Image: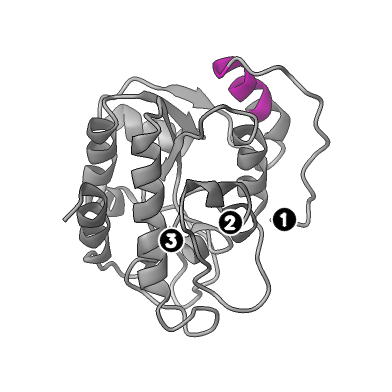
Amino acid sequence: MSWEVDFVERLAGIRMENVFNPYSDRCEIYDLTNAPEIRSQNLASVLKDRHSAKIDSIWFGRDLGYRGGRRTGLALTDEVTMLGEARAAGSLARATHGTIVGERTAAVIWSVIRRMKRAPVLWNAFPFHPHDPESAFTNRAHSVRERRNTIWTIEALIERFDHPRLIAIGNDASKALADLGFEHETVRHPSYGGQREFIAKMEDLHALVPIDSPPVSARLL
């Protein structure tokens, strides 16, 4: 069994209350019958591709959102980007039916990635989608207790990719890395007015030529 498959299978075995695990849980409204298997394969394919490309950075968000990673199984990646730029990472497939859904945060993040020579590994402080009780299509911040059950994912990725540069997107991700004692850079999260600051900081960190990009559509929430 490959490292990537073993990593995803271990993720799939975790169960938590009021948390959607995209590698084992299935949404009865939007998911295809074999959605968990599709998302598991998506993640394994991306990890394999990134390792082969010898990436030198990992970007960390907070947790999966219901419009993004809950549907794709990929951190900071919605269906729009998964079927576009992210597909170059391997054989990726939709796990849902109906209209393709976009997410504003993913759109901003991928607007930077597409300008880079090599895409980073994208991960979260907490790798699942935490939601409010009895309200699956909401986003809430994960708890410290929940994160403790998945800390091994952060450690495993950093070790697997030979201790690359770590970039925390937002204070929650920064705190998670700091609690583990990992040195990292912190950039402002692109939501709630932080888009331009996020892009400018990422341009600086990755030596990208600055561009004056128009804001991503506010329709992508």
Q: Is residue 58 above or below residue 140?
A: above
Q: CA distance from mark 1 to mark 2?
A: 10 Å
Rendered residue at 64%/33% (across/down)? 112
Neighbours of disc 3 within 10 Å: few (<14), some (14-19), many (20+): many
The reply to whether dot 1 and dot 2 touch (C-beta < 8 Å) is yes
Rendered residue at 24%/35% (across/down)? 160
Residue bearing the label numbered 1: 220
Type of amino acid at the residue the image marks with label 1 = Leu
Neighbours of disc 2 within 10 Å: few (<14), some (14-19), many (20+): many
Type of amino acid at the residue the image marks with label 2 = Asp
Residue 219, position in %: x, y? 78, 57
Q: Is residue 156 visible?
A: yes
Magenta-drawn stretch contains 202: yes
The secondary structure type at the circle numbered 3 is strand
Type of amino acid at the residue the image marks with label 3 = His
Residue bearing the label numbered 2: 78
- Of the 4 image quadrants, the one containing the N terminus is bottom left
The reply to whether dot 2 and dot 3 touch (C-beta < 8 Å) is no
Which dot, 1 or 2, sits closer to the camera? 2
Task: Specify the label residue 129 is tagged with.
Answer: 3
Q: Which residues are magenta?
A: 199-206
Depth order, front residue of 77/19: 77
Task: Specify the label residue 110 is tagged with.
Answer: none
Q: CA distance from mark 1 to mark 3?
A: 18 Å
Which dot, 2 or 3, sits closer to the camera? 2
Q: Which numbered disc, 1 or 3, marks the residue that appears first in the sequence? A: 3
Q: Is residue 93 above or below residue 136?
A: above
Is residue 119 found left or right of 213 in the rendered image?
left
Which quadrant of the figure has residue 198?
top right
Rendered residue at 83%/36% (across/down)? 214
